[in-house]
Amino acid sequence: MIVNDLKEKVMSGLVITREESFLLTDAPLEELTAAANEIRERFCANAFDICTIINGKCGKCSEDCKYCAQSAHYHTPCGETYPLLPTDKLLAQAKHNDAQGVLRYSIVTSGKALSDDEIDAVCESIRTIRQNTNISVCVSFGLLDETQFKKLKAAGASRVHCNLESSKAFFPNICSTHTFEEKIETLKAAKRAGLSVCSGGIMGLGESMADRIDMAFTLRELGVASVPVNLLNPIPGTPLGQNKPLTNDELCRIVSIFRFILPDSMIRLAGGRGIIGDKGEKCFRSGANAAISGHMLTTAGITVETDFQLIKRLGYEVKYINE
């Protein structure tokens, strides 16, 4: 009865504890996913948040994240490198996504952080996008400070993305060139600047379920509205290139537990969804209600057209929530 008891607790507006969340790790999967879906319906109704991303600056990243094809520390199939894209290229993709009905468009750049000059350049691009489309602009520019985030907000950005990747305890196993605390401060700085935040992690790095749960509780403490759940797509040449991807059932359990912990967040299937046979459909019946659509940064994704067909079949409606 533990699944039903915790579901009723969450549905009544209370929060579950870390210890209670561990009781869900061995619960019958079908019962768990059905309960998570009920919680999603209670707090988010049928809203589905869809976004796309563009690789706004590619390759030669100074950071040593062990999963990343763009890190300069590893030799990977991602040989493409280029500086910050000009406004015309960023605008063209934004217009295309806007015409498809996508809600959000995220500009993502490689490197630890954009320079002040790069921030000024991309602010001009964001202003142009906002003047010529109806799409919301999100940014993922690394470990910026509050002053830089205020510039981006003034230019028209609405949300900042900065993944925690995993728990505080596990993070040193996947990156040594920046810290978990720096990521936390980045998210707090973005919120102080008046921006909403998007943050989640990658499943299948070698972390435990305890690490995943700890990350979810950190996100709850930070008040994160959008939580990307990435499935590691092992890239040859990276230290994690030999990892075995998680199964669809494992991912559904993670998504369901996250829904219990984060009842009103948009739980967003992100990178790696393309290697799941059903394109995430089972997860979208297990508490997930958002997605990154189209191509990922260095790997193929699922087309926007395909995703809109799936969203419609599942009875969702594409609209903003938790703005």
Image (tube, grey):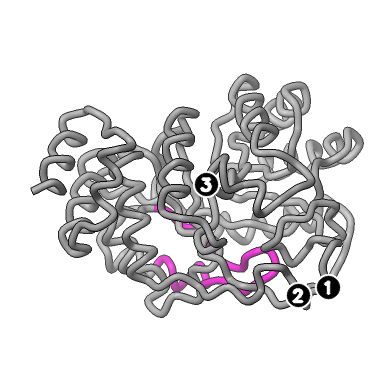
Q: Earlier in the sequence, mark 3 or mark 1?
A: 1
> Can I make out residue 97 in this image?
yes
**Residue 63 x %, y %:** 80, 51
The residue under label 1 is 75
Give amino acid for label 3: Gly
Give amino acid for label 2: Gly
Question: CA separation, marks 3 and 1?
Answer: 26 Å
Q: Nearer the viewer, mark 3 or mark 1?
A: 1
Tag 3 near tag 1, CB within 8 Å: no
Q: Which residues are magenta?
A: 290-308
* Foreground of the two, 282 or 149: 282
- Please identify the residue farthest to the right as the structure is shown: 117
Report crowding for label 1: few under 14, some 14 to 19, many 20 or more residues within 10 A (C-alpha): few
* Foreground of the two, 85 or 277: 277
Residue at point 81% right, 38% down?
124
Tag 1 near tag 2, CB within 8 Å: yes
Q: Earlier in the sequence, mark 2 or mark 3?
A: 3
The residue under label 2 is 237
**Residue 59 x %, y %:** 83, 61
Secondary element type, mark 3: loop
